[in-house]
Amino acid sequence: MALDSDGNLIMVGEFRAARDQAPPFDFDPTKGEVLFPTTRWSDAFITKFRPDGRHVWTRVIAGEGEEYALGVAVDRMGDIYVTGAFENNRTYTVDFDPTKGVDRRELVGASDVFITKLRADGSYGWTHTIGAYFFDKGQGVAVNGQGDVFVTGAVGVGRIDFDPEKGEDWKTTSTFTVFVSKFQSDGDYEWTVTNRGEGYAVAATDDGGVVVGGRQDGIFTMRVDAEGGREWSHYLRSDVNSGHARDVAITPDGGVVVSGRMYGTTDFDPGPGVDERTDPGDGGVFVTKYAADGNYLWTYTPGNNEEDASAESIAVGPSGQIFVTGEFSLTMDFDPDGKGDVKYAVGVGDAFVTTLEPDGQYGGWTATCSSSQTVKGYAIAVDKNEDLFFAGYFTRTVDFNPTPGVDWRDAEFHDLFVSRLNCGGCDVLTGHQAVSMPQGVLSRVQTSLRGGRVKVGCAGPSGKESGRSHIRDNGTATLRVRPLQSGHYDCAIRRITGQRGHDVCRGRYSSRSVRVE
């Protein structure tokens, strides 16, 4: 998942039929329909949404095998870069042009890497494929301010040519191998660096370099400069020789934050110091930070338990605030070194979103989503206002609103979700729901105050209108914003005052998109 400079959201992944003769997959989560047929084979998708959740377009890469998209990045022009893999137990071809054109590529090994570029309007750019005779896959992609594209993943044993054009850049591997390749925005190949292990994620640095996260008998992180030279690498091995970095991100100070899953006892300080953390069960959450030069700074681990947990994705806001999503089971204390913030999983696994301060201290809140079976957070992104978007999959019935309000959704089997959360700056605000009413919007606000007033403003076809209401002793307020013409409106809390009339919060908080009929 990635955001462009206008706040549009791009999601990638895979979809398939849950049963024979399954209905088409609808990629438009609103009242419209954007249908694509489903089969027992996985097909890759790329979908674009506006900031208010409206569907813009979907493109599908489909063939007579398994095609899946595992990473996405967006450049300053809004152009989109996707990586993943296509595989089969026999040779076949895939048309990587998801529009009316044709660009067929043939599978070389059991599984091959692909890198595809789409323009902001969904039109086709180019595709490169990389493969030998074993299982090769692209898992992460990043793009820097100059338009350079970096792809990471893993390749199997043998000789492989990483230059997908007319040149050659052969590498010989004797085991499963991390690769990071650099391309220009027009697809021209530059270089590839390899290392033993598997690459899961990549992040571009401001100086033209790149950071890769993955595994190599444990948690692996490597930084490479703009010319392909290795600057530093860290290998964090536990007493059970396991663990991996699932995602990496760059902080405003140039540091590197890494999230993933740990096993057993791991020393997170790769230098002469010691910072050991122990997971008592089947895998636990960690977030660790290095300075730009690789020096160790800090590690955060919540109260991991004897069941499975993982931090799947990490994002950093403009202020340096860190946001993490993943999955946990049973109970987990997300603030074990402070006052405690214990969350209880309802199903086999629940999704979480938590926040950390730039220094690694607990950020004060964790949101969870529960099902009687499974909800898993796979990807997270943060916009310039530090509103969050997180995505994953769920089964059964889930309330995706982590505040006192509700937003129930039902899954037919394993369904995809994407949610938007407002996280900015108003500590007394605990919830906001906005729904359409005749010629207006009905807004319900939850706070931790007893008394005071709240103002909600809506912007749309009617211009800007606002409504105000008193906050009741139970902390809630209900108000109406009207009259409003038909159309889409962005409604946000603009001001909260206390009982004495003083400003508690003033700005723009908890934005909601509403369509007035």
Image (cartoon, rainbow, N blue to C red):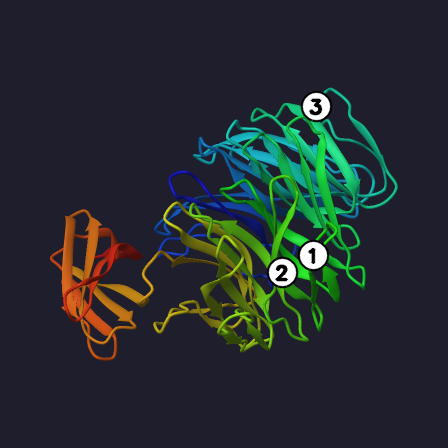
Callout 1 amino acid: Phe
Q: Quadrant of residue 237?
A: bottom right
Q: Percent position (x, y) of residue 252?
A: 49, 42
Relative to 323, is 475 on the left or the right? Answer: left
The residue sitting at the top extreme is 166
- Viewer-side label of 3, 1: 1
- Viewer-side label of 3, 2: 2
Give the secondary structure at mark 1.
loop
Q: Which residue is mark 1?
A: 268
- Image vertical order of residue 295 relative to residue 472, above or below: above
Q: Which mark is residue 145?
A: none
The residue sitting at the left extreme is 483
Disc 2 to disc 1, C-alpha distance: 10 Å
> Looking at this view, is 118 or 273 the one in front?
273
Q: Which residue is mark 2?
A: 286
Q: Which residue is mark 3?
A: 165
User: Do the residues under discs 2 and 1 have CB atoms within 8 angstroms?
Assistant: yes
Residue 69 at least partly seen: yes
Residue 512 at least partly seen: no
User: Do the residues under discs 3 and 2 have CB atoms within 8 angstroms?
Assistant: no
Q: Percent position (x, y) of residue 260?
A: 64, 57
Callout 2 amino acid: Phe
> What quarter of the picture does the C terminus occupy?
bottom left
**Which of the two discs, 3 and 2, labels the residue nearer the N terminus?**
3
Callout 3 amino acid: Glu
- Image vertical order of residue 58 relative to residue 302, above or below: above
